[in-house]
Image: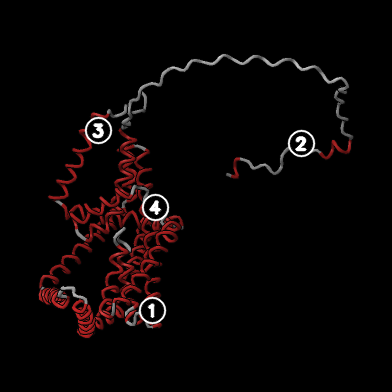
Amino acid sequence: MSGRTAPMPPWAQFFLIPAVLLVLWILGQTVGHVILIFLVSVVVALTLNPLVRILRRAHVPRGLAVLIVYISFVAAIAGGVFVLIGPVQSQVQDIRDNLPSYTDQAQRRVLDVQNWLDDHGIHVDAQKKLDSAIKGIRDKASQAAGNVVTYSLDVLSFIVTAIIIIVCSIYMLLDAPRIHRFAQRLGGQGAGTYLRRTERGLSEYVKAQLLVSLIIGVTAGVVLWIYGVTGLFTPGATYAVAFAAWVFLMEFVPYIGPVLGAIPPVLLALFISPITAIWVVIAFVAIHQLEGHVVVPQIMGEAVGVHPLVVIFGLLIGEQLYGLVGILLAIPTVVIVKESVVYFSERLGVARWERVERAPPPVEPEPPPAPPAAEAPAPHAEPPQPEPAPSASERREVPTRMMDAPTSSDY
């Protein structure tokens, strides 16, 4: 019996693909929180498994290797939070304390703009629009401050979910060889290749995204600090760490992350003057031009390997299902889905949808060209002379085998 699988006809694909998507959507609506926990656990396990494999090559027992990797992982996150939480919290509190003075500056600026509009006969009540915007911001802030109980319950739910994710991912790492063998028993050798390929794609994406976010966040912080020292944007030197941390986090959101990262400093600059805000906008445009043309092509490359439209739709679906968490998980999920589609298309032998075109009209063959006339030999051509035989010393210098040619063992 042949090991090949008959290709799935296009009519079967036409019904199967929408059915699979419908089932996934129903599962997402009914047991969405469970799927979210499972998905995050899979992403964490697949991302950390290469580090466990490196320790296993050093003959470290798997349980101890998982423990070392997880302790290092948690310590790195806790260390980063510990280093940044103090300056970020202090600078955010300074922004909140100085917000009344910033609003007073903005009102004075708006009053100047209102006078200019009145002098030129432009009937726009800029002061009223500013008062409405400030009132909306204060209402949102007071509403957020009043939801302490809701936020406490959300934090408690987040802690419980995080503990479940950690436990699930630890079990996945401990049983990774068993899961690999089970997948090969079910799906053959291709299933093991699929797991390795998915793991490699996720690891490359996470490493590249961390490096890109770190570079852009540090660059934004340094540029805003320079702005503050030179007087272009005075709060830039005071709140450089807070702005850098915000830009670092927003870089994990594809496509719209750079815009979200620029919003707080631009808004703060608007409270000072429109010219200051323009300088800050110019800085972020330059930073993200550097990101798009230098940093991302050199570091990210083809880490995801899918069309940008697929990534955008993945972001929209993730935001619709799980909000901000769904946006952060969109790219890892797209990587997993891409490798799954490749594996199942190979496994099921999905036939390609090809367009049938008309055959081109036959072309009459041209008659063969006439053979060229024979050329007469040159009148004084000398017959070729045989080469002289090498002497005995020259024969001894000719090698009998290629010593420098690489053998198959060198590869």
Of residue 124 and residue 275, the one placed in the foreground of this image is 124
> Mark 1 near mark 3, Cβ–Cβ under 8 Å?
no
Q: Secondary structure at mark 4?
A: loop
* Total marks placed: 4
Q: Split into 4 quadrants, where in the image is the N terminus? A: top left
Residue type marked 4: Ala
Give the mark nearest the N terminus, 1 or 4: 1
What is the x, y in percent for residue 111? 20, 82
Tell me the CA gap for discs 2 and 1.
72 Å
**Label of residue 303 in the image:** 4
Q: Split into 4 quadrants, where in the image is the C terminus? A: top right
Tell me the CA gap for discs 1 and 3.
57 Å
Q: Which residue is mark 2?
A: 400
State the image quarter where residue 223 is shown: bottom left
Of residue 116 and residue 113, the one placed in the foreground of this image is 116
Q: Is residue 394 above or below residue 199?
A: above
Q: Which residue is mark 3?
A: 13
> Mark 1 near mark 4, Cβ–Cβ under 8 Å?
no
Give the mark nearest the N terminus, 1 or 3: 3
Work out whether residue 97 can be spotted.
no
Label 1 CA crowd tier, 10 Å (few <14, some 14–19, many 20+)? many
Q: Which residue is mark 1?
A: 227
**Label of residue 113 in the image:** none
